[in-house]
Image (cartoon, rainbow, N blue to C red):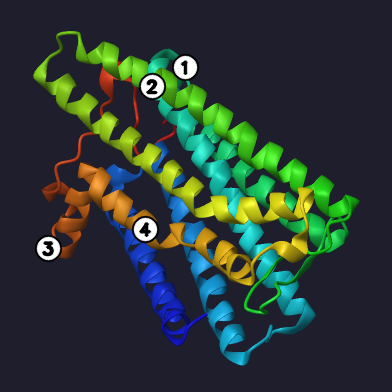
């Protein structure tokens, strides 16, 4: 990396951590925002903070050092945590897609979703991330520094049966399956939104439906940007699995895992740009307003409840 890129990594880390802490602060301050959907977003912010706290600083220090600076144990921790948070993020984005699908397309099913249901889905996403992070540590594939020594990641230079099988399973379970679920959910959500637009509704329901469309658009943008961020890393792993790892350019080897972390940097921007409720909450917090001063409705179209998570039902 150039000197400018080296200097930018700590700055990105600080900005990402602070912006995601602000996101968490907004959800904590305004209980009107503590809906099931936003509970998933809160967990996504936690994954972003985790990656920013570990990924950027350790990569910058190692790159300045000229090789991996933190030893074997540090490599296992660094790579394991990055895989953990990355796979958890994919799972959480899938949960968001399912939530949008049930809320908008099947309100009766959405009405039966309890806090325990959302907790189970969120824990499932975290458990999935933990499983795939631990596998290379216990022997299914392995973690190692990349050729530049700036990062630690899956040891794609050793493209043996263990690496190839691990990579194929990760791609299938954490890429193909989630993408299929997301495509199915958002296709039907889009159809429902179009159908709703052709019907005559009260002004209140139209306003509330508009809020739900905002949340859905925000979710879609997050997923698209996450796929953009992780695509180079996926290409490197697939290249190493089916091609010659020695032909992977060093620049791509170092940029791919760092680019995968970039979603931590722009997710807070997506919340602000694509979600009017969140934008109003942020302005209210900066103006030191109370929760009552922020107009946030909590009733969904077709009477689907999305009550704050402090209640027994969601």
Task: Please rate how many residues cluster around mark 4, counting C-alpha atoms within 10 Å: few if below 14, some from 14 to 19, many from 20.
Answer: some
Q: Residue at x 42, y 48 (%)?
A: 225
- When the figure is inspected, residue 176 is found, relative to residue 290, above or below; the finding is above
Say which of 104 and 60 sits in front.
Answer: 60
Q: How many marks?
A: 4
Decide if residue 246 is on the left or right side of residue 1: right
CA separation in Å, label 4 and label 1? 32 Å
CA separation in Å, label 1 and label 2? 14 Å
Disc 4 vs disc 1: which is toward the camera? 4
Q: Residue at x 41, y 79 (%)?
A: 8
| Quarter assignment of residue 7 | bottom left
CA separation in Å, label 4 and label 3? 23 Å
- The residue that disc 4 covers is 266
- When the figure is inspected, residue 176 is found, relative to residue 106, above or below; the finding is below
Disc 3 vs disc 2: which is toward the camera? 2
Decide if residue 110 is on the left or right side of residue 25: right
Q: Residue at x 17, y 49 (%)?
A: 280
- The residue that disc 1 covers is 109
Q: Residue at x 52, y 58 (%)?
A: 47
User: At numbered mark 2, what does the secondary structure look like: helix, strand or loop?
Assistant: helix
User: At numbered mark 3, what does the secondary structure look like: helix, strand or loop?
Assistant: loop
Q: Tell which circle, 4 or 1, labels the residue nearer the N-terminal end.
A: 1
CA separation in Å, label 4 and label 2? 24 Å
CA separation in Å, label 3 and label 1? 38 Å
Where residue 238 appears, x then y in whole percent? Answer: 70, 49
- The residue that disc 3 covers is 287
- The residue that disc 2 covers is 189
- State the residue lying farthest toward the bottom: 65
């Amino acid at each position: 990396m150039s000197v400018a890129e080296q200097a930018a990594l700590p700055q990105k880390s600080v900005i990402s951590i602070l912006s995601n802490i602000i996101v968490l602060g907004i959800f904590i301050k305004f209980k009107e925002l503590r809906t099931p959907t936003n509970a998933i977003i809160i967990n996504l912010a936690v994954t972003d903070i985790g990656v920013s706290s570990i990924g950027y600083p350790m990569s910058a220090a190692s790159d300045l050092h000229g090789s991996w600076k933190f030893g074997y144990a540090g490599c296992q921790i660094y790579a394991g945590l990055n895989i953990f948070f990355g796979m958890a993020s994919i799972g959480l984005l899938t949960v968001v897609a399912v939530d949008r699908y049930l809320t908008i397309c099947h309100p009766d099913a959405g009405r039966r979703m309890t806090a325990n249901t959302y907790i189970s889905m969120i824990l499932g996403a975290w458990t999935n991330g933990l499983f795939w992070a631990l596998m290379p540590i216990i022997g299914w594939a392995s973690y190692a520094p990349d050729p530049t020594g700036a990062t630690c990641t899956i040891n794609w230079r050793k493209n043996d049966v263990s690496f190839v099988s691990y990579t194929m399973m990760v791609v299938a379970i954490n890429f193909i399956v989630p993408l299929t679920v997301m495509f199915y959910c958002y296709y039907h959500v889009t159809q429902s939104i179009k159908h709703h637009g052709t019907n005559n509704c009260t002004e209140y329901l139209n306003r509330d439906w508009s809020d739900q469309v905002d949340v859905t658009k925000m979710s879609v943008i997050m997923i698209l940007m996450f796929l953009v961020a992780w695509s180079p890393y996926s290409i490197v792993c697939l290249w190493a699995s089916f091609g010659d790892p020695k032909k992977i350019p060093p620049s791509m080897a170092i940029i791919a895992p760092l680019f995968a972390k970039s979603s931590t940097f722009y997710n807070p921007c997506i919340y602000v740009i694509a979600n009017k409720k969140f934008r109003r909450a942020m302005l209210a917090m900066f103006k030191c307003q109370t929760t009552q001063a922020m107009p946030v409705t909590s009733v969904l179209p077709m009477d689907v409840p999305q009550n704050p998570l402090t209640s027994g039902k969601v």
